[in-house]
Structures are given as C-alpha cells and as structure tokens.
C-alpha cells in the first residue's frame, strides 16, 4: 500500500482527539482507515468503532474503504468478517466494528471502546458523538468536509489540547 501525503499528515497528529477536515477526495477516510488497520494489526484485544450518520453511509464510505485496503494488501480473511455485526476480528482478537446510532441511548448502550472514528462527523449529532467519545479510552478520530461550522469547531477545538485541526487537500 502506498503511503500518501494525507497518511503522512495524519500520522503526525499527536493528540487524543484528532480533528481532520478536507474536501471530497482529500484522502481523509482512506488515510484514517489505513492507520486504524495498522493499529489493529499491532495492538491485540482492542475494540475500534467506526461510526457514520447512517448504515448506508457507513457501508458506502468507511466500510468500503476498509474492505478495499484489506483486500488490496492481502489481509482480508473471510471467516474473520461478521456481516451481521459489520465487524472484522483480526488474528490478535482486535475488532473493528462499523456502526450508526440514531439515539443517544443506543450510543451509550454500545459500551466502551479503545478507539473511535466518527466519519463525516458533521452529520452526526453532538449528543451522540459526545456519548461515544465519553466511552472511548484512547484515540478519537473525527473527519468532515469543511462546509459549515459544527460541534467540532464549537466544542472540540475549543478545548486546549485540541485547538488545531489538520487540513487535507489531496490524496497524493
């Protein structure tokens, strides 16, 4: 797999909450998914949750890119994929699950996780995102297209440790 400029920029982010903005095709989702795959392969017994606004959005975005990267690098093993739960379990027992939540209660009921990625975060309500972030032990990734100001600007980037976001302009 080729390490793109976008992936190099993402790897350099050294914060717990990683806010990544960029236009369509900037490589945000691809880069974050690639980093999460590497993390999953290197860290046993982790739970990684990838969230988008709806199940179709999850399937058409992050899940498609996950599958393409895994297959393209020869890492995909069909028996490790649970289509019903939309979860892939690595040989080291780390699990990446792909989800959507339509209520705060469901987000809270999903329990704790080690890593969270909210894909196209500007389409997920702050209440749901907050419920997920509170229950995340480690890194939190947020990506979005910079169309309008939303809760990442008004809530996350106002926190001292998270004042800077990363902007991706191209996937080359």
Image: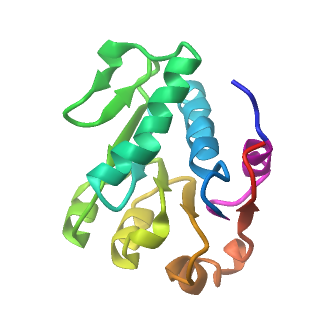
Tell me where residue 8 appears, x and y as whole percent: 79, 43
Q: Residue at x 55, y 28 (%)?
A: 69
Tell me where residue 139 appears, x and y as whole percent: 57, 53
Q: How many marks?
A: 0
151 over 102 or under it: above or below: below
**Is there any visible trace of residue 44 in the rendered image?**
no
Tell me the quarter of the image containing the N terminus.
Answer: top right
11 over 94 or under it: above or below: below
Front-lying residue, 124 or 163: 124
Tell me where residue 90 appears, x and y as whole percent: 44, 22
Name the residue furthest front: 24
Q: Residue at x 42, y 67 (%)?
A: 134
Q: Quadrant of residue 36?
A: top right
37 over 166 or under it: above or below: above
Query: How are the residues colored?
Result: rainbow
Q: Residue at x 37, y 75 (%)?
A: 125
Tell me the quarter of the image containing the C terminus.
Answer: top right
Front-lying residue, 112 or 5: 5
118 over 46 or under it: above or below: below
Q: Any magenta on residue 116?
A: no
Q: Any magenta on residue 7?
A: yes
Tell me: 34 left or right of 150. Answer: right
Q: Give the extent of the magenta segment.
A: 5-21
Q: Residue at x 38, y 25 (%)?
A: 89
Q: Quadrant of residue 21?
A: bottom right
Tell me where residue 43 appears, x and y as whole percent: 56, 30
Tell me: 100 left or right of 124. Answer: left
Tell me: 161 left or right of 138. Answer: right
């Amino acid at each position: 797999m080729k390490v793109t400029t976008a992936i190099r920029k993402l790897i350099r982010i050294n914060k717990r909450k990683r806010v990544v903005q960029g236009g369509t095709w900037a490589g945000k989702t691809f880069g974050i998914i690639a980093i999460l795959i590497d993390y999953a392969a290197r860290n046993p017994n982790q739970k990684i949750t990838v969230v988008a606004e709806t199940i179709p959005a999850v399937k058409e975005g992050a899940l498609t890119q996950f599958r393409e990267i895994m297959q393209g690098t020869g890492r995909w093993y069909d028996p490790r994929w649970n289509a019903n739960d939309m979860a892939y379990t690595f040989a080291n027992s780390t699990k990446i699950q792909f989800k959507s939540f339509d209520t705060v209660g469901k987000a809270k009921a999903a329990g704790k996780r080690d890593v969270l990625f909210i894909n196209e975060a500007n389409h997920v309500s702050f209440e749901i995102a907050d419920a997920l972030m509170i229950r995340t032990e480690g890194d939190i990734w947020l990506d979005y297209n910079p169309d309008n100001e939303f809760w990442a600007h008004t809530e996350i980037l106002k926190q001292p440790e998270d004042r800077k976001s990363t902007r991706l302009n191209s996937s080359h």
